[in-house]
Image: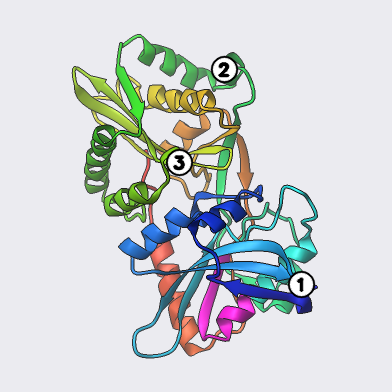
């Protein structure tokens, strides 16, 4: 199959790209048009969007962030939760995925770039020993892990799956009379950003979910997919906040924080539960906890999110160029350092 695959790069406008995305089950925010544009405008990335063609038939999609090195040839091509390879009409298999990965790797390696891919594929969904033939190798970094809450269930059933201690904390918070406001209006979004900025400054987090990035992303998203802010107030003072992103049938916890005043009254549990309710009321099929890894997620955040009782999942480990030269090895070293220093932006 690999010999018959070819890539069509940057041939899709925003509307066409969004239309193509709608046909895939494994969609994530990182493969949406607005996300790539926000990265390009706030973090010096160049965005490339590719359609993988098998003959004349699209068989996969990917949005790559590319950062060339100044002066000399080389740089990084980073694909996060791509390529998309599981269309709703079926037909996706491990051979197709390996072939697509190989075609993408060859395209960027021919341009002298170090290739790094976090596949949008379930763990163990394709044979790892096929990577070398595709010009790729295991990068030694675990795949994305999180948990999903099935919103097709009745609200009482979803609440019944909450961990007992977490549910008790939620009930306590509900009795405090906190004023929870939610929506996409600018005033509420600004209230979230102010709390988020304080949170990052206090915790000294290194994160890609920065205030400028969120502002730019919000300005680029269509009206029906604007980021939703939920803010809990006590005596008109914000004590907790959450930001939700949406794509396909999924609402995802993107960032959040709880103030010192909000922690004793369990404002975080209340706001996270309201976020789940908000997603269900608006017809989403799934609520994603936005990152939940027993080894990498800070313990406090991990226990907070596991209280939702979602079904855990993990994607394939990251993969990379298998035969990098000196420049590519230098880029790899810098990427590894940057990823080791990154921290979650939520609490």
Q: Quadrant of residue 142?
A: bottom right
Question: Residue most toward the top?
Answer: 175
**Quadrant position of the C terminus in the picture:** top left
**In terms of depth relative to the viewer, which is nearer, 65 or 22?**
22
- CA separation in Å, label 1 and label 3: 33 Å
- N-terminal of the pair, mark 1 or mark 3, is 1
Residue 162 vertical placement versus 67 (above, below): above
For mark 3, give the secondary structure. Answer: helix
Q: Can residue 127 be seen in this view?
A: no
* Magenta extent: 104-118
For image coordinates 59% across by 50% down, the residue present is 27
Crowding around mark 3 (Cα neighbors within 10 Å: few <14, some 14 to 19, many 20+) is some
Q: What residue does disc 1 label?
A: 55
For image coordinates 48% across by 89% down, the residue present is 326
Left or right for 179, reference 65: left
- N-terminal of the pair, mark 2 or mark 1, is 1
**In terms of depth relative to the viewer, which is nearer, 326 or 84?**
84
Q: What residue does disc 3 label?
A: 225
- Judge depth for marks 2 and 1 and give the one in front: 1
């Amino acid at each position: 199959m690999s010999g018959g695959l070819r890539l069509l790069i940057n041939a899709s406008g925003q509307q066409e790209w969004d239309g193509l995305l709608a046909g895939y089950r494994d969609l994530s925010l990182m493969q949406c048009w607005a996300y790539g544009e926000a990265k390009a405008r706030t973090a010096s990335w160049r965005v490339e969007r590719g359609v993988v063609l098998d003959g004349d038939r699209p068989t996969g999609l990917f949005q790559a962030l590319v950062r060339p090195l100044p002066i000399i040839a080389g740089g990084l091509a980073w694909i996060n939760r791509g390529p998309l390879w599981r269309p709703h009409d079926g037909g996706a298999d491990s051979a197709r995925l390996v072939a697509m990965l190989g075609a993408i790797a060859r395209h960027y390696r021919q341009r002298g770039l170090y290739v790094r891919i976090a596949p949008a594929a379930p763990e163990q969904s394709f044979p790892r020993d096929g990577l070398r033939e595709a010009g790729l190798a295991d990068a030694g970094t675990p795949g994305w892990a999180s948990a999903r809450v099935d919103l097709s269930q009745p609200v009482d059933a979803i609440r019944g799956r909450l961990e007992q201690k977490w549910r008790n904390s939620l009930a306590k918070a509900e009795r405090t009379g906190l004023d929870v406001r939610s929506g996409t209006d600018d005033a509420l979004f600004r209230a979230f950003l102010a709390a988020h900025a304080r949170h990052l400054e206090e915790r000294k987090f290194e994160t890609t979910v920065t205030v400028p990035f969120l502002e730019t992303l919000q300005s680029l998203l269509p009206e029906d997919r604007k980021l939703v802010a939920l803010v809990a107030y006590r005596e008109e003072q914000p004590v907790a906040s959450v930001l939700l992103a949406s794509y396909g049938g999924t609402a995802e916890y993107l960032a959040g924080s709880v103030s010192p005043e909000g922690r004793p009254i369990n404002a975080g549990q209340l706001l996270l539960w309201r976020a789940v309710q908000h997603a269900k009321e608006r017809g989403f099929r799934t609520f994603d906890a936005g990152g939940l890894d027993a080894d990498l997620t800070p313990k406090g955040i991990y226990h907070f999110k596991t209280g939702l009782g979602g079904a855990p999942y993990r994607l394939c480990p990251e993969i990379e160029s298998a035969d990098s030269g000196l420049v590519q090895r230098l880029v790899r070293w810098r990427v590894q350092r940057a990823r080791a220093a990154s921290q979650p932006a939520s609490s």
